[in-house]
Image (tube, grey):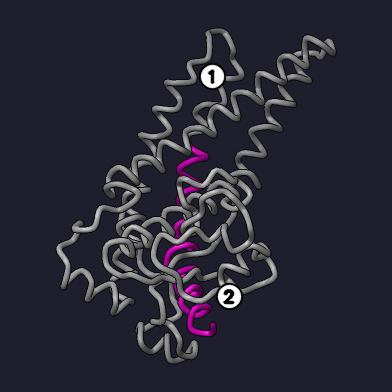
Amino acid sequence: MKGKAAFWKLTATKLHDPWEPRFKSAYSAVMKELQPEVIRGDTPFDLQKWQVKTVAAMHPLYSKLFNEAGRFLISSSKGVREGIVTKAFGQRLPAQGTAVELVSFLSRRISMTIETTYNAIRAIFEESLRDNLTAEQVLDLIYEEFADVFGLRGDDIARTEVAGVIANANAYLLQQTVDMSEWATAQDDLVRPTHVVYGEAAPKPVGFNYAKLVGEGYLLRWPHDPECEEAGEIINCRCIPIPAGEFEGSEDELNALLGDTGEPAEVIGG
């Protein structure tokens, strides 16, 4: 367990920590551009246009992080490296389809948050008609809605999306290179009770449905499984799938193995 926790910590330091503010900044930039159009309200709001703009703005970040997460797992996992060498890459058909399809799916999914904001603004306008709110009161409510997007909600979105890309990049590689994997958690008090169970479980065949361990009927083959329909298992989840049995040493041994300097990995571009 110590080795799994150490590897999770390195992943957080090298990937989660530097990427979360980048995602939040890019997403906030889209929302800041959207805000005046919503407030002006002199033309019908084009939801599809803004969803397309969101995908265009975020997709490059998803691609870069997916590739960086993949390189990090390959460099740190002997089993994955050997799997890539001994098997033609892509020989196993991943349950997620191709990497390009997966990244596109993830970047399209975040565009759905535009609809959430749009619906919240519509509710404000409906409230203004029902309660005879003044224009100033309506603006205050709209600004509060966007302040939440730029604040705590933006943090949640960035944390969830970054963790989701990393977890799915790992899962994509594991499907093609190894037979057994493990669920790695942060092993702190914030881990969901169900994820504690998953993290303490013995190694499982890649693609195993972890939800079965807690008697649930939904699909959850790895952290942030894109086919999982239970949002409570996904939002703010920090877990990652890892190859089975590779990270069993102490934190110092693992740091030495991976050449960890204690500093976040350099992130190029963006």
Identify the residue position indicated by label 2 in the image.
200
Relative horizontal placement of residue 35, taking residue 134 as reference (left or right): left
Calculate the distance from the C-alpha at mark 2 to the C-alpha at mark 1.
Answer: 49 Å
Position of residue 75 relative to residue 32, above or below, is below
Residue 239 appears at what percent x and percent y?
Answer: 52, 64
Position of residue 237 relative to residue 72, above or below, is above
Residue 265 makes an appearance in the image: yes
| Type of secondary structure dominating the magenta stretch | helix
Secondary structure, mark 2, is helix
Relative horizontal placement of residue 176, taking residue 35 as reference (left or right): left
Secondary structure, mark 1, is helix
Q: Amino acid at mark 2?
A: Glu
Q: Earlier in the sequence, mark 2 or mark 1?
A: 1
Closer to the camera in the image, 247 or 32: 247
Q: Amino acid at mark 1?
A: Glu
Residue at 33% across / 57% down in the picture?
172
Relative horizontal placement of residue 13, taking residue 267 as reference (left or right): right
Residue 260 appears at what percent x and percent y?
Answer: 39, 82
Local packing at callout 2 (Cα closer than 10 Å; few below 14, some 14-19, many 20+) is some
Q: Is residue 266 within the magenta segment?
A: no
What stretch of residues is rendered in magenta? 1-29
Quadrant into which the N terminus falls = bottom right
Q: Quadrant of residue 15?
A: bottom left
